[in-house]
Image (cartoon, coloured by chain):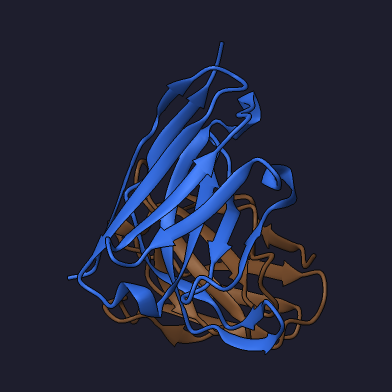
Chain colours: A brown, B blue
Amino acid sequence: DIQMTQSPSSLSASVGDRVTITCRASQSIGNFLNWYQQKPGKAPKLLIYATSNLQSGVPSRFSGSGSGTDFTLTISSLQPEDFATYYCQQSYITPPLTFGQGTRLDIK
Amino acid sequence: QVQLVESGGGVVQPGRSLRLSCAASGFAFSSYGLYWVRQAPGKGLEWVAVIWNDGSNDDYVDSVKGRFTISRDDSKNTLYLQMNSLRVEDTAVYYCARSVGGVPIAQQLLRGEHFDYWGQGTLITVSS
């Protein structure tokens, strides 16, 4: 199975900050990497698919990049509603479909 | 609009059974693969089971193989998860999710899947 590792596990930042979250795959997955945002008590929400494609309705301050084994999610200017937990998910070979362990983004 | 609504959660003793349902609306249900994904309290996301759009294939995470069965009734636009021999470690919020973007690359394998819609989740607590 392909293992996904996110870093950092948690992060504190302020409104207006630029934030980057990293996801590393245990083997090359091309560009088959997706990002989700989850707020407490809510279902995950798709932000980005296939590394860099913004899901409809997602603000343009979110962007994704990478290829092979290393990927990043960047929020260019944090907004209050962005404080949440973020998960990456590989879609190179499924099933099994695997997620990273999550990155919790808190207000500093 | 697309909606997925789970039901059937609750408190159950270890070893007992439970069936979850996920009622779908707002899209062509039979055209999509569907997943159950769970999240234990304070933990991350874990896929549980998948069923392909035509029902021809299904698969499970190793920890539930032989105990859980995923199924779908396209006439009712409903996804199910039959959960038998429940264990304490099955305690979690269970989400159904619609899979899009997947392309077959080999028998029972896809590439490019992601989840564009999720239900609100239903909590299963397995406790004596």
Q: Quadrant of residue A16?
A: bottom left
Residue A106 seen in render: no
Instruction: Please name whichever residue, A15 or B114, is drawn nearer the observer in this view of the structure.
Output: B114
Q: Residue at x 67, y 60 (%)?
A: A6
**Residue at screen point 76% across, 63% down:** A3
Relative side of A53 to A24, left or right: left
Q: Which residue is most to the front?
A: B75
The residue closer to the viewer here, A37 or A90, is A90
Q: Position of residue A32 (x, y in %)?
A: 62, 82
| Image x and y of residue B110, in percent | 63, 81
A24 lies above or below B120: below
Q: Residue at x 39, y 33 (%)?
A: B9
The answer to which of A64 and B116 lies nearer the viewer is B116
- In the rendered image, the residue lying farthest to the top is B128
Name the residue at 49% across, 25% down. Answer: B125
The x and y percentages for residue A40 are 38, 43
Q: Quadrant of the C terminus of chain B?
A: top right
